[in-house]
Structure formats: structure tokens, C-alpha cells
């Protein structure tokens, strides 16, 4: 098992919205303490500096990964925990350098005047969730000056009910000035045959539109959630094993952020070390259920969200999930492969 090089931070489960598709609705509403946050980041940094050794109970040597790890800050709504958010950004820069990639997800509604610009100036990549009705998207977009929208990513979750509107929603966001767009399927939902047909049709429509943009060289949007697909396409590799580690509001590390909605007693046996020590217990359980974790559109994500959620189901994976994830992964892979022939795409994605 490879040592993690991507830390996902949940500062708190508090949120000003209650999106029905959110897999993190059960995350603890407590906010991580300043002391726990400092200690966890310091431990993660120390684990990165450790000499090559063994990991996750394996007997073979595991080399330390070169360069800085990536950081993703989720919630809940991170902007409702500004004090610890500021501390997290300061500590990441202090421990890992100014160039450490930091990605912050927000629903955009709590943004204060000038806050988005300040975060961007500090090197934080900002993604605004644009789920829900058009009025909600408009309210979030209104928090961002038009001149900033080209520097901020916008994302939507495709649900079985909204799958047929996916292409129209991304076109609307593009029209609002966002040039970095992302979508992913709802991992909490049951995808029946009709919903999957709508999702496939929307994905085909999106791909044709993306190919048209590539051909003209104008208006190519960034694949905001496509960094792994782009890297894999550029290197000609297959998706590799999961390298993520999650830091929960309780100050402990866990092997997968999709499991954090569960009761504390259920999660405690799966706590990990800052270098990923102990993750194999989770991955072995996932494999026993037929789920093998990976970096891109992870098949274990819907399983973990259901298996460890606040109300575990007898049949953990909602029907159609594997097919929905394949549609999303196929769209990303096709768009990435096609994009590599475009100088504009390569410039946008740094390849």
C-alpha cells in the first residue's frame, strides 16, 4: 500500500445547507481544535520526512513520495470555521512550503466581500459547489465578481433526477463566466436504467461540446476534477491505488473521507497513522465487498458512504453506482485524451 500524498481535511461538519445528495451530512458538527489541527499536520509532515520503510503492514519497502502532498479542505462548509481554516492554511504553508497545492470546496454563499480574491492570492484553488435550483446557483455566483469567475472552479453533482439537465447546467455556468468546470454522479443514490440512460446521453453531449471547443481552440474549460485523468492520459498509465488520507474533526486520521458520516464508535477501529499505517484494514474490508479503491472516480466511494454512514444499509451500494461512476470516469478519460492534442488544453492543465 502506497504512502498517502493527498490529505483531505474536514474542519467541521457544520453547513448552512442540507443538500439531499451530500454524503457528509453526518460528519461531526464539532470543529477540530487548533491544537489537534497543528498536531495532525505536524505528524503528517513528519511521516512524509520519514526514511523509506514499510507501510500498512506490508513487508516490502515503501519509498517516500517526492515533492509536496496535495491538500483538499471540505466540510461541512469550511467558511463557517474561518478561524481554524486560517490556521490550516498557515500551517500547511509553514510545514510544506508556499507551493503546496491546496484546494478549498465551498458552496459559495458564506463568501464575504474580497474573500475569494484573498484566498486565490494565497495560492488556494477554489471550487464552488453549484448544486440545486438555478436561484441557488445565481446566489452563489453573485458572491464572486465576474472578473474572478474565470479563476474559480464551479462544480455540480448529477443526481438521477437532474442527469438529463447536466449539459445545460454546465453551459449555464460557462455562460456565467466560469472556465473551470466539474461534475460527478451522486454516490448516495440508486441509479436505475432510465437515469443511467439520461446520464450517458448528457455525458455524450458534454463530450461532443468539449471536442467542438477543442477543435475551434476557443472557450476550452478546465476539467476541474480531471487532474488525475489528465496525468494518466499524458503518461499513458492506468489509475493507480488510492493515496488519500482524511483528517476528521475529532483530530484523527481515517483511510477514506467518504466514511466520516458514521458514528464515532463505528469509525474508531479504522483510525490510521499519519503515514497511512493501518489503512489496509479498511481496504481489505472494501475488497471483501468487491470494491477496490483507486485514485480516479473511486469504486469504493459509494460503498464507504453507505457502509459507514449514519444509517448503514443491509445492501450498502445503491443500485447502478458502478455504472454511474464508469460514465463519469469515461467522460473524464475521453476529454483528457482528446485535450492533449490541443495547445490551449495543455496550457490550461500544465501538461
Image (cartoon, helix red, strand yellow):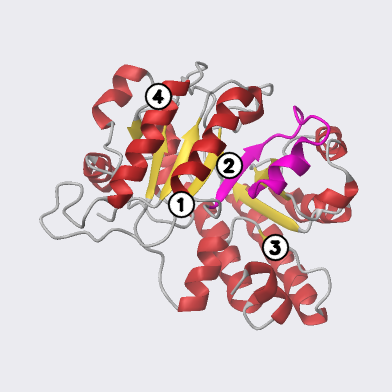
What is the spatial separation of the Cα atoms under label 1 and label 4, in whole angstroms? Answer: 36 Å
Q: Residue at x 77, y 43 (%)?
A: 117
First in sequence: mark 4 vs mark 2: 4
Q: Residue 139 shows which numbered tag?
A: none
Q: Residue at x 49, y 37 (%)?
A: 91
The residue labelled by disc 4 is 36
Vertical placement of residue 109 versus 102, above or below: above
- Kindly check if marks 3 and 1 are in contact, taking CB atoms under 8 A apart as contact: no
Q: Is residue 225 left or right of residue 295?
A: right
Q: Residue 186 shows which numbered tag?
A: 2
The residue labelled by disc 1 is 322
- Give the x, y percent position of residue 62: 21, 59
- Give the x, y percent position of residue 75: 56, 30
Q: Nearer the viewer, residue 273 or 20?
A: 273
What is the spatial separation of the Cα atoms under label 2 and label 3, in whole angstroms? Answer: 21 Å
Q: Residue at x 71, y 55 (%)?
A: 181
Residue numbers of the magenta segment: 101-125
What is the spatial separation of the Cα atoms under label 3 and label 1, in whole angstroms? Answer: 25 Å
Amino acid at each position: 500500500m502506497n504512502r498517502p500524498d493527498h490529505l483531505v481535511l474536514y474542519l467541521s461538519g457544520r453547513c448552512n445547507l442540507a443538500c439531499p445528495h451530500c454524503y457528509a451530512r453526518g460528519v461531526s458538527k464539532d470543529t477540530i481544535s487548533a491544537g489537534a489541527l497543528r498536531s495532525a499536520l505536524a505528524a503528517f509532515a513528519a511521516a512524509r520526512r520519514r526514511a523509506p520503510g514499510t507501510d500498512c503492514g506490508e513487508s516490502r519497502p515503501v519509498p517516500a513520495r517526492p515533492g509536496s502532498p496535495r491538500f483538499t479542505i471540505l466540510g461541512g462548509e469550511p467558511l463557517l470555521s474561518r478561524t481554524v481554516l486560517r490556521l490550516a492554511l498557515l500551517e500547511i504553508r509553514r510545514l510544506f512550503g508556499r507551493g503546496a497545492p491546496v484546494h478549498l470546496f465551498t458552496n459559495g454563499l458564506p463568501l464575504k466581500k474580497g474573500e475569494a480574491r484573498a484566498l486565490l492570492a494565497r495560492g488556494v484553488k477554489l471550487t464552488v459547489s453549484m448544486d440545486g435550483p438555478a436561484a441557488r446557483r445565481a446566489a452563489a455566483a453573485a458572491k464572486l465578481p465576474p472578473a474572478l469567475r474565470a479563476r474559480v472552479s464551479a462544480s455540480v453533482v448529477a443526481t438521477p433526477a437532474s442527469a438529463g439537465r447536466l449539459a445545460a447546467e454546465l453551459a449555464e455556468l460557462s455562460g456565467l463566466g466560469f472556465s473551470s468546470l466539474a461534475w460527478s454522479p451522486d454516490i448516495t443514490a440508486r441509479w436505475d436504467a432510465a437515469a443511467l440512460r439520461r446520464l450517458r446521453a448528457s455525458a455524450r453531449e458534454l463530450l461532443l461540446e468539449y471536442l467542438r471547443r477543442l477543435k475551434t481552440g476557443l472557450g476550452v474549460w478546465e476539467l476541474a476534477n480531471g487532474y488525475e485523468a489528465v496525468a494518466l492520459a499524458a503518461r499513458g498509465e492506468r489509475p493507480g491505488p488510492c493515496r488519500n488520507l482524511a483528517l476528521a474533526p475529532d483530530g484523527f486520521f481515517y483511510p477514506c473521507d467518504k466514511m466520516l458520516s458514521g458514528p464515532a464508535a463505528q469509525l474508531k477501529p479504522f483510525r490510521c497513522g499519519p503515514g497511512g499505517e493501518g489503512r489496509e484494514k479498511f481496504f481489505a474490508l472494501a475488497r471483501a465487498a468487491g470494491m477496490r479503491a483507486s485514485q480516479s472516480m473511486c469504486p469504493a466511494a459509494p460503498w464507504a458512504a453507505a457502509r459507514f454512514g449514519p444509517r448503514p444499509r443491509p445492501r450498502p451500494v445503491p443500485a447502478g453506482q458502478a455504472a454511474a461512476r464508469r460514465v463519469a470516469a469515461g467522460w473524464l478519460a475521453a476529454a483528457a485524451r482528446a485535450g492533449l492534442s490541443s495547445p490551449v488544453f495543455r496550457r490550461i492543465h500544465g501538461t
